Amino acid sequence: MDPDFWYQRWREGRIGFHQDQPLPLLLEHWPGLGLAPGSQVFVPLAGKSHDLAWLAAQGHRVLGVELSPLAVAQFFDEHALTPQVRDSRYGRHYRAGDIELICGDVFALDAQALSGCAAVYDRAALIALPPVLRCRYGGELHALLPAGCRGLLITLEYPQHEKHGPPFAVSEAEVRELYGRDWNVATLERRNILAQEPGFAGGGVSALDTVVYRLAKLGDDS
């Protein structure tokens, strides 16, 4: 998917994926991960999500990656934060308190960039990607996270032929194929949300579920 697609979405304000409050599923399931205070959380394709501020408020250090400079600027502006800025081979880093956003390509990260991450949170990254990039994302990017890393993955399931993505439908079978080699995958919840999503219902989608998975990265000897 061309980066210009996302740049244009942000310029035009076509960001229906953005929510004006932290995701209730995050609030419900995150405590079950049992992370230590101060743990670093990796948030790919972060946008300007309020989930970032919520995670920081729980005592975590947040490392988000976002392609759009406009999204990054809006996040700090809307939270009245003045970030320190520096550049690295990964992109331009914006940091304020316990929140750091890298404006750049998430696929440019390497194991060194992610070595301190004890957790990963994906609400809208996997489902934003077409199938070829989902293979890279799950099979290559997540493979860089250290053993013992834990996280939440939230997906959507609907008949893909009834609506063009993004967001794309990602089945449980695909999740287990993408992550099953390196991660323990547990399904925590499947919830029918079609009635709460008029854009899907009005577009002719006949069924829509959101699914929450708990991820645990296996060790080298697992």
Image (tube, rainbow, N blue to C red):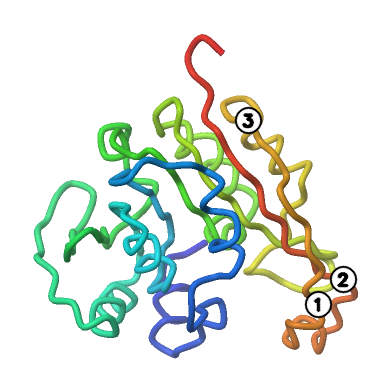
Q: CA distance from mark 3 to mark 2?
A: 28 Å
Per the rendering, the mark at residue 207 is 2
Gap in Å between the C-alphas at discs 1 and 2?
6 Å
Against 118, residue 146 (above or below) is above
**Quadrant in the picture for residue 185:** top right
**Residues under labels 3 and 1: Cα distance?**
29 Å
Badge 3 is on which residue?
Answer: 184
Helix, strand, or loop for circle 1? helix
Upstream in sequence: badge 3 or badge 1: 3
According to the image, label 1 marks what residue? 194
Say left or right for 144 vs 158.
left
Q: Residues within 10 Å of mark 3 (few under 14, many from 20)?
A: some
Label 3 sits on what residue type?
Answer: Asn
* Mark positioned earlier in the residue sequence (3 or 2): 3
Q: Nearer the viewer, residue 125 or 10?
A: 125
Find out whether the residues at labels 3 and 1 contact each other: C-beta distance under 8 Å: no
Q: Looking at the picture, does residue 218 appear above or below residue 117? A: above
Compare marks 1 and 2 and give the one earlier in the sequence.
1
